[in-house]
Amino acid sequence: MSKPSTATLVWDAPTRAFHWLLAGSFATAFITAESERLRDIHVLAGYTVFGLIAFRLVWGLLGTRYARFSSWSLSPRKAITYLRSLFTRNSQHHTGHNPAGSWAVVAMLTLLAGTAATGWLTWNEIGPGWLGDLHEGSANATLALIGVHVLAVVASSLLHRENLVRAMFTGFKRGVAGVPAAGKRTAVAAALVGAVGAFWGGLMPAPGLDTRQALTAAPTATLARAAHHDDD
């Protein structure tokens, strides 16, 4: 007999903070990728992505129940079974990451790490010239995967009748009664957000960059484009 389901704390605060900080950092890096004036902002965002991934690797070992890698199901057979169940009346429901979602997260972290690494090598003019093309290709592949992720979240929300986007804000989703995520860990989340804020505020060093000058260049570039547009 299955245990009753209830609103359960699944995603701890550090996992949620990581998720939204990573989304914002990648979006910033992608939007500024083609701008020479905003190159330093692009690099800052890239450093942030790399630092967030490093945090997630650590939190995957030390975090709460559903944040740990040990809770992820990476069996190809289980992933296929899960995907097939979506086309039946008895689609599988998982409290944490479902098997297909686990693979998607691994792919996304791998692509983002590769994008950040090739970007750093290109920026520092290390390695062959095709690394720049690989960097751009990895970023585009990541964007495509994010699109699939968003569609999957919408589909899962409709199939299981639960708002997964809201769950990533609140931490609560449908789970087995009496099996919580083992704590919010708000202090860790605050430290993560504070570290990112300090990095962007210039209180933590960004190798090879003057953070304050980079941030000052952003509005200057915007005003310059506006002036050029007016002249046209």
Image (cartoon, rainbow, N blue to C red):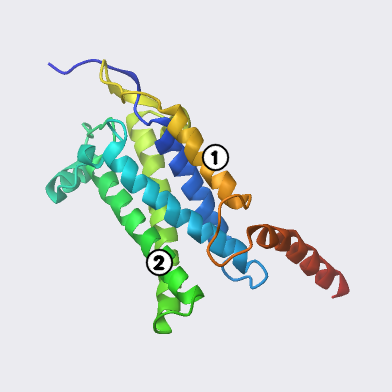
Question: How many neighbours does mark 2 have within 10 angstroms: few (below 14), some (14-19), or many (20 or more)?
Answer: some
Tell me if residue 7 comes above or below residue 138 in the rendering: above
Type of residue at label 2? Ala
Name the spot of residue 82 as percent of width and height, x first: 20, 42
Above or below, 150 against 45 in this view is: above
Q: Which residue is mark 1?
A: 194
Given residues 220 and 222, the one toward you in this image is 220
Residue 129 position by quadrant: bottom left
Task: Look at the picture and state if 44 lies above or below 72.
Answer: below
Please name the residue shown 29% across and 37% down the image: 62
Looking at the rendering, in which quadrant would you find the N terminus? Answer: top left
Earlier residue among tags 2 and 1 = 2
Q: CA distance from mark 2 to mark 1?
A: 24 Å
Circle 2 residue: 117
Q: Are marks 2 and 1 in contact (CB under 8 Å)?
A: no
| Location of residue 149 with respect to 128 vertically, above or below | above
Of the residues tagged 2 and 1, which is closer to the observer?
1
Task: Say which of 96 and 162 sits in front.
Answer: 96
What x and y, as percent, mark residue 224? Answer: 79, 68
Amino acid under disc 1: Gly
Residues 185 and 210: in front is: 210
Rendering quarter of residue 155: top left
Q: Secondary structure at mark 2?
A: helix
Q: Position of residue 37 (x, y in %)?
A: 68, 70
SS class, disc 1: helix
